[in-house]
Image: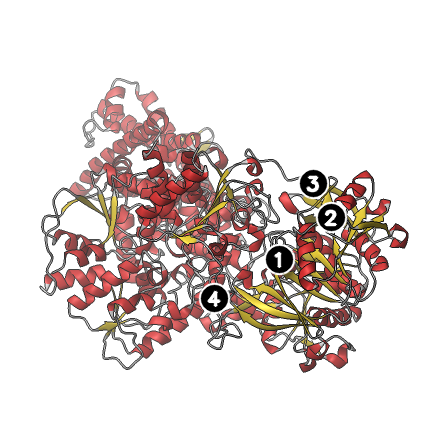
Amino acid sequence: MPRIFAYIVHSNSAADDSAAELAAAARRIDGAQAPAAIVTGWGAGLDAVCEATCAQYGEVWKIANPALAYPDAEVIRKALVNVVPRGSIVLAPHAHFGVDLSPGLSIKLNAAFVSDVVDIEGLEGGWLKLVRQEFGGQVSAHVRCDISSGAVLNIRPGAFKPWDGAPVHGQVMDHSAGAGDLTVRRRYVETVLSEAGGVDITKEPVLISIGRGIQDRDNVALAEELAEAMGAAVSCSRPVVDAKWLEKSRQVGSSGKTVKPKVYLACGISGSFQHLAGIKGNPFIVAINKNPKAPIFRVADVGIVDDILEFLPEMTAKIREQR
Amino acid sequence: MQSIAGAVYAFLPGRILFLILHVLGLVCFAYIVARRLAPLRRAQRDFRFDRPWTRLVRVLRFWLGQWRHPRYRTAGILHILMFAGFIILFSRAMDLLWLGVSDSAANAGLPGLAGRIYDVVRDYATSIVFLCMAAFAVRRLLFKPVRYAVPARYGKAHTADAVFLVALIAALMAADSLFEGAQAAGGAQQGRPVEFLAALSLPWMVKQTLLAAPLAMLARLHLGAYFAHEVTFFFLLCYRPFGIQFHVETSLFSIYFAKLDRGTVKPVRWGVPDEQLEQLPSFGVKTFEDFTWKHMLDFYSCADCGRCSDQCPANAVGRPLSPRFLTIKARDYSFRHYPVWGASRNGAPLIGGIYSADEIWSCTTCGACEAECPLLVEYIDKIVDLRRGLVDAGNVPQSLQKPLKALESRGNPYGKMEKKRGEWAKTCGVPVLNGNHDASTVYFVDSITSYDDRMQAIGRATAQILSRAGETFGILGAAEKDSGHEVRRFGEETLFMALREHNTEAIKASGARRIVTADPHAYNALKHDYKDMPPVEHISQFTARAVRAGRLKLDAVPDGQVYTYHDPCYLGRHNQVFDEPREVLDAIPGLHRVEMSRSRDRSFCCGGGGLALFYEPKEEQRMGVKRVQMAAEAGANVIVTACPYCMANVEDAIKVAGMEDKMAAIDLAELVEKQMR
Amino acid sequence: MEILVCAKRVPDTSENEIALNAAGNDIERDDLVFSVNEADNYAVEEALEIVERAGGMVAVVTVGGDDDEEVLRREMAMGAKNGVLLSDENFEGSDGRGIAEILAAFVRKGHYELILTGVQADDGAAQVGGMLAALLDYPFASLVTSIDVLDGGKLKVGREIEGGSKEIYEIELPCVLSIQTGINEPRYVGMRGIRQVASVPIATLGKADLGVDGHVGDAGARVKRLDYFVPPATKGAEMLNGGRDQAIAKLIELLRSKGGLQ
């Protein structure tokens, strides 16, 4: 059984939620092994992250280097190639960083690569049996991966519950010396923050979220009216922003904002994982959608099959009546 | 009577002076017109020389008969009076020309009584034209009708130019009156038999005023007035081609060559059959020279009356489209690029130049502009040609690309599966025709009625009506594709031809000898865009016939509702089917019906159909909302319409306007189905 | 600049439900319509805009069979100068790396300064771009939402990260970028345009032409899909049936109890 490593994404001296999720995924591959974590970076925050990660990982391989101060996947890949033993399994979260890092990493490590893994069923012979989704989440597929020369797996955020076993008291090991030459042909310049809209949806406790099902810019008003009646705010999924019906600051999802509301009304949203990835904290999710087979119904707490263009105004009227 | 030809002006004898003036004037005019014709020689072909008798009858009706003018009553009547005046005065103008170069002209004209009568009529005509000019100036300066206003983005107001022209014509009339009156006054003093001067006419008033004037002065006035008249006449003649007044000359031609076939769209290139279209290097209008000569003639013929934009629904809701300025901007472009003096330049792209893409996409092809224009200027073909150019260049808004792609791959703009197209009919047992059935009639459903949950109700209602009236019919089911009506009008001609070919085969294979549809866009497409089709009927026509023949009986509606009928553009205005739907409604006992002020061929577009529902316009308000408000103003609380797109727009508008408790909408077929026994 | 865009022909799934076939081991393919992967189309548009500004030409390549030619033709109708089909029976069953190897072999035969792929295709793997870059040893950036050509053989690219923010990088040419949807507004390609390129020759290269070996084809694949399935419904949502009025009433009650009404 190869050694399992998890790449820890961190910022502001804290590890990302994915760290605990990868710890769980690793144990699904091999329950007997306490996986190792890899943390790269530079500066004081790095040690804090390494310490925190020791709870879930047997070893924490720290790679410190000024070139790693900003998490640039091109630089990190080079470091990992120099440090990770060949034949290992490396896990990373399937998000904007993992997508940048992992495919190239798998080539350089000459390992197999599977992207966006939602479940791990276990080993069958020399093959790891995994589950992925295709066609925007409409169907799932069993995939087998030859791990004889190792593997790089990008794990879907939220697919695995964070590992909550007893703390492992792992050791931090400094592998900075092994990083090697980190010159790359890509240079990080800066991060441009998105313009703040009027409303900060990340701070709202109740969100009325609209998707493609709203169909028309003018119909956005239906959601705004319901939000007003409920004292909530309006957010949306990506297609609504692409169509320019709402500003980017309203978008919930992996390329939008991460929200932690108490209540989330998903109206006319199909429920792609990129959107759901933006919803944290296990809110009460209500889904209203014309399509009874929409994936959103699998994750919602309450579901209503109906046309939001009719449902929303009627609901608004009822709420106003009762005031 | 004083001879003009023989008189001496400064040092020149009259006949020489005026010979020079007239010849110069005519040569100038001819040169200017020749320069104005220059772009037409570079333009695309246009086949307008067929059916000469039909065209002549239309000239009599629209040009001579001024048929469209009274639609705006005051301006219309004034124009008719002025036009009649011009026709009558034409002979006078010719006489006056001769007078300057030859004394023999003094005795020309109609002899005897006829001549005297003409003189009286002519004098009144001069006066009426003069008064009309005064009225026009007052309207422009005091009353300022809204349709004459020039929005800031189109430049400065046209008032000064209009008043200038009006003043010139008034001056012409005044000069003639002075010429006439001075001579009559002189004659009266000399005791000559007084020529009949129409009492209270302008020349008469001049004569009265000058009765006591010294003869020498009268002679000078007479000569001077003549000179003034001729100079003004030729100035006007040469000035007219520089502005909207050119319509005086071009209107005859623009009306003669006007489009005869309603509801059709011009081919991509006249004279190039469909099979050879592939060889064309470019589709549509991208530069000015891509227009046909008739379209360029239209630009010259616009009288800037603003009636088209006044009726245009896109203009009314604040979209960037104003038909009047489509024409005026193009005319100004041609004046700039083909100047009378100077070299001509051609080839600048229109979109991004005088036009914006949004302007061109904003049109719903409702045809209100074309129905209104007194000069029969055409708009829809130009918009379609401009869209063809945009499509050819790939410049299509993303909101339209999606349904176009879906139409190409699935035959409907929603991207839904072909096999589901006929599913709506399964609940009512409508057969799918595949050549095996004995049905003589095919019900062409088209995409929105087939796939939209709400509109399927119209399909079911239509099927019930056909059954109840004893018609054996079927649908094409999955073999049917979108009629392509809007695909063509949005400029995607190639995709349209593919859809047409497919549907034509399907209809032929069905063996049907008649087509019925509840969708006016499909109706128009099958009637005008498709070739060699069996006869097509709209469900309203079918129902009217069935009611008349007693095959359908209708029960009374409950009291308390006031109904109004909204004419769908493609049933009403484009196909002149106004009466049958009303006949059907009036055949329902107890149905209280009112007319909206804008109805029949003045109906106000609901917002457009087909691809127009996908386009996201920049507008201040929805057309549908305005229409629903019009229905409320007419006192109605139910709008009846006969088109699924009208239904979609109207129902949507009722919600957006918050009028759910004040207004309901129902399709004619749905209403009939509810009430039929 | 010579730009190569890697495109893929995928089923159009936006309005259509993907369903399992009767045997339950694959998706129902009978009614599928195919088109170019949306992100790849954005990539071609981006490439065309770059050469319109900075000069050059755009080539499009795909790995597949005869059916996949239509994707090349469509992008050529859009403005790409050349289309190349990489086809060989030995390529069938390739996994992501296999596809990347085939593309890398093709890239090595040319002089492309910039190679674009779409961020991801129908399988959502988002892998070929990154793999291609590593095989060629070119720098890489994914989720690109803006490209500016700088002097000195460099590009300034923006990458989409969470919260709608953008990472800006300078990247040296030659490089590989994977393009995110929404980066531009692709021009329309009409039926006429496609017909006009219907008989333009498409170069086809096979295994021998490319000199590719190793990881291609079914034999070389280390990742294989075994089946398609629909996961058994987990607890899922509590569906509120019984008509709209009832649903609204129940929903309001629930919201009140969860603190959703303020």
In terms of image quadrants, where is residue B248? top left
* Mark 3 crowd level (few <14, some 14–19, many ≥20, 10 Å Cα): some
**Disc 2 target residue:** A55
Q: CA distance from mark 3 to mark 1?
A: 22 Å
* Mark 2 crowd level (few <14, some 14–19, many ≥20, 10 Å Cα): some
Seen at 72% across and 74% down, the residue is: A126
**Disc 1 target residue:** C42
Q: Nearer the viewer, mark 3 or mark 1?
A: 3
The answer to whether residue B541 is left or right of residue A194 is: left
| Residue closest to the eye, B443 or B513 | B443
Q: Nearer the viewer, mark 3 or mark 2?
A: 2
Type of amino acid under label 2:
Ala
Q: Nearer the viewer, mark 4 or mark 2?
A: 2
The answer to whether residue B639 is left or right of residue A120 is: left
Label drawn at residue C29 = none
Identify the element where label 4 is drawn. helix
Type of amino acid under label 1:
Tyr
Q: CA distance from mark 3 to mark 2?
A: 34 Å
**Disc 4 target residue:** B408
Type of amino acid under label 4:
Glu
Subunit of label 3: A
**Disc 3 target residue:** A192
Are discs 4 and 3 located on one and the same chain? no
Q: CA distance from mark 2 to mark 1?
A: 44 Å
* Mark 1 crowd level (few <14, some 14–19, many ≥20, 10 Å Cα): many
Identify the element where label 2 is drawn. loop
Q: Are marks 4 and 2 in contact (CB under 8 Å)?
A: no
Q: Nearer the viewer, mark 2 or mark 1?
A: 2
